[in-house]
Amino acid sequence: MNISYKQLTSVILLLIGTAISTYAQTSWYDGTLFPLIGKTSEQTETRYERLPVSLKEVSRPPVWHLGKNTSGLALRFRSNSTHISARWELLEDVSMNHMTDTGIKGLDLYAWNGRRWQFVNSGRPTAKKNEQVIISGMTPLEREYMLYLPLYDGVTAISIGVDSLATITPPVLDIPSRKKPMICYGTSITQGGCATRAGMSYSNILGRMINGEVINLGFSGNGQLDYEIAQIMSARTDAGLYVLDFIPNVNLEQIREKTARFVEILRKENKDIPVLFVESIIFPHSFYDRNIFEIVQAKNKALREEYEKLKKAGHSNIHYLAATELIGHDGETTVDGIHLTDLGFVRMAEELYKKIEEINP
């Protein structure tokens, strides 16, 4: 059979057009179809938030508001699609002058490569309502994915897009393990300020390092030992570790008056769950600002004293991590002298991981 050049060209163009058409036919799946990890409770006002609705009239307004931020939450799914897209609508469309939009309100996609969670790409926000192809050009293999939600904004709706002929299902692998979740309580640093993307907060890095669920209860400027937060942490009697990283947000009086009571509430339901106290990082600019240096040193000293009192009072399985090596000594780990860069978060996660390995070998 003889085929003319014109006919051959037509066939090739038809095949190219078909391929483009197939790729363009994205099928969308609502995020409610997939497991959401990183929550203390399912009894929240909406799905994508961190605090149970029971605290709505109990917590201080800024704490309740920050609970709407989705730091630490992630969707888990499995697909053989050659591309992954996402649609997400933000609660507020927040912007800040010291943190990237991808960290504040973007998405962050990771895939399990058989050994570890590997970064795929980020979903970059452009407005309150967003739609973006996060990755394309992949071979059509079954992969397990984890999609981190924004650190400093909320999400009212999210959908995942895949090839129209691809499959997408809940995960097959039970990873990160949801048994004995770690719960991190603290400040803006705990919440993830100022990571460049959602996967780079220290709690999310730790989650990948241990391949286990880590619940983020960081509240920017408001990690002030609110007792109702200790109560919801205590309600998770299945927790594997409580990490307390609140020192930058409290003063000396609060440390001395509230630390012991917070821990007593925390351990009311299960006294065997280990507790790790974490000192405030030594802010790099405090090398020059001696007032800040003295404040940080005094607060860390007060925390150590409270820790020792708790041990003398009979509390066992409580642990302490000094600030000495938390972020290194080169001064290159913050955006503004306080909030961490990705480098700072990696270093802090590595130091926490070493301590966690000692506590739970």
Image (tube, grey):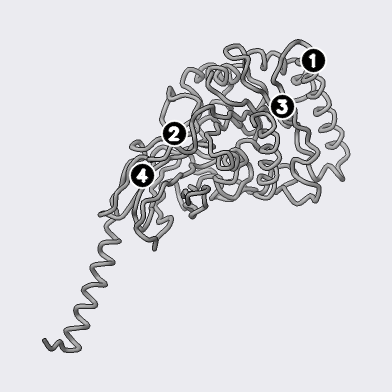
Which residue type does callout 2 highlight? Answer: Tyr
Query: Does label 2 or label 3 sit earlier along the sequence?
Result: 2
Element marked by disc 4: strand
Q: Residue at label 2?
A: 48
**Label 3: how many Cα within 10 Å (few below 14, some 14–19, many 20+):** some
Residue at label 1?
309
- The location of residue 57, given as percent across then percent down, is 51, 17
| Looking at the image, residue 85 lies above or below residue 223 | below
- Whether tag 1 and tag 2 are in contact, CB under 8 A, the answer is no
Q: Quadrant of the C terminus?
A: top right
Q: Would residue 230 be visible to someone looking at this image?
A: yes
Instruction: Single out the residue that lies furthest toward the front.
Output: 361
- Give the Cα distance between marks 3 and 4: 38 Å
Q: Which mark is residue 159?
A: 4
Residue under numbered circle 3: 277
Closer to the eye: label 1 or 4: 1
- Identify the secondary structure beneath mark 3: strand
On screen, 17 above or below 329? below
Q: Residue at x 20, y 88 (%)?
A: 5
Q: Nearer the viewer, residue 135 or 94?
A: 135
Q: Distance of mark 1 from mark 4, alpha carbons?
A: 49 Å
Q: Residue 149 appears at what percent x and percent y?
A: 48, 42
Q: Are marks 3 and 4 in contact (CB under 8 Å)?
A: no
How packed mark 1 is, by other alpha carbons closer than 10 Å (few <14, some 14-19, many 20 or more), is few
* Disc 4 residue type (three-letter): Ser
Side of 305 relative to 316 (left or right): right
- Sequence-wise first label, 3 or 1: 3
